[in-house]
Amino acid sequence: MAAVSSEAVPGARHQLAQRLRAVLEPRGGGTTRRRASDAFRLGLAVVVVAVSIPVMKANSAAELSIVHAVHPPPAAISWLVTTVFWLGSAGVSVLLVIVGLLVPRLSAVRWTAVAAVLTWGVCILLGVLLGPAAGRPPVSELAGVNAGYPVTQLAVAIAVAATALPYLSPPVHRLVWFLVAVAVLAAICGGHALPVNAVSSVVLGWGVAAGLHLAVGSPLGLPSAAEVTAWIADLHVAVADIARAPRQVWGVEQFTGCSPAGEAIELAVYGRDASDARVLAKLWRFCLYRRIPAIVATLATDGRHRIGFNG
């Protein structure tokens, strides 16, 4: 009986490890590369944060109306609002660190920690440059509301989430973003942040994560060579020795193989980031040549065979 129990323990641990990987690990081959969409996110974040600063200084009537409508919360649930805010901000950061240790993916934990430190540093820098309230004039209508900017808890939570989630599975994505969204609403309702301050802080953390991904890369969710081999087999196309190509481009996972006759075959799996890469390239040509770029379709003339998939 003891022998059976001792053999069952490793089996149970193996099943638990497999279930954790199914829930926590990302889909695809785990390829890590820079994405064109991260360049868009970084540029958009810079613009939004820059625009939000004069908006904060204006103390707009619309923002004050939102604050009056949702703050303060009923006394009976004020503790719940505060709890939700901390769980969705600091709690998310702690949760993702624990999840990263469970997978385990040391690179994910490392870059998540870097994103948190970078965001915290950017928040301190902005606080020094802009002042504790980003130049927002004090008004009696905001009594009891934290007018500080940036909202460091939200910015760090968003940066940690946006950095770590590409390494994790879609179910974890949905849970984390739900917690963060509720935390932002709780921050405004509980007086922990003003609406524009909260949104700008969220975008700030999002931009830091995009900049980090642009610098070091992130998982694309594109398939591995084994998965492409299975797809090719389902299409009844004879391709052997499928391997990842040494040269890659944004948004596309390229593979090489050979036909039964020995001819070289190129395979390309296009992800959603491929369209972003094309738009970014056209925008660059427009800025460089000061003219609207024409969409030119080119055909390969080097005699090689190419098979494409939409990921």
Image (cartoon, rainbow, N blue to C red):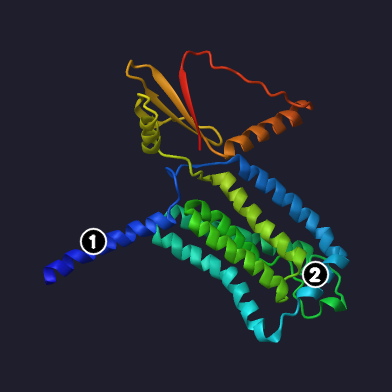
Residue at image point 59% right, 63% down: 178
Location of residue 180 (image quadrant): bottom right
Residue 153 visible in rendering = no
Whether tag 1 and tag 2 are in contact, CB under 8 A, the answer is no
Q: Which residue is mark 2?
A: 66
Residue 257 vertical placement versus 209 (above, below): above
Label 1: state its secondary structure: helix
Q: Amino acid at mark 1?
A: Gly
User: Where 240 sits versus 42, above or below?
Assistant: above
Instruction: Please name the residue shown 29% across and 59% down the image.
Output: 15
Mark 1 / mark 2, whichever is N-terminal: 1
- Residue at image coords 79%, 72%: 67
Which residue does the numbered mark 1 point to in the structure image? 11
Q: Nearer the viewer, residue 42 or 119?
A: 42
Q: Nearer the viewer, residue 281 or 276?
A: 276
* Horizontal side of residue 10 vs 284, given as left or right: left
Q: Position of residue 249 (x, y in %)?
A: 54, 32
Residue 197, by quadrant, is bottom right
Q: Position of residue 296 (x, y in %)?
A: 66, 21
Q: CA distance from mark 1 to mark 2?
A: 55 Å
Amino acid type indicated by mark 2:
Ile
Give the SS element for disc 2. helix
Rendered-image quadrant of the N terminus: bottom left
Q: Examine the rendered structure and indicate whether residue 34 appears above or below residue 248.
A: below
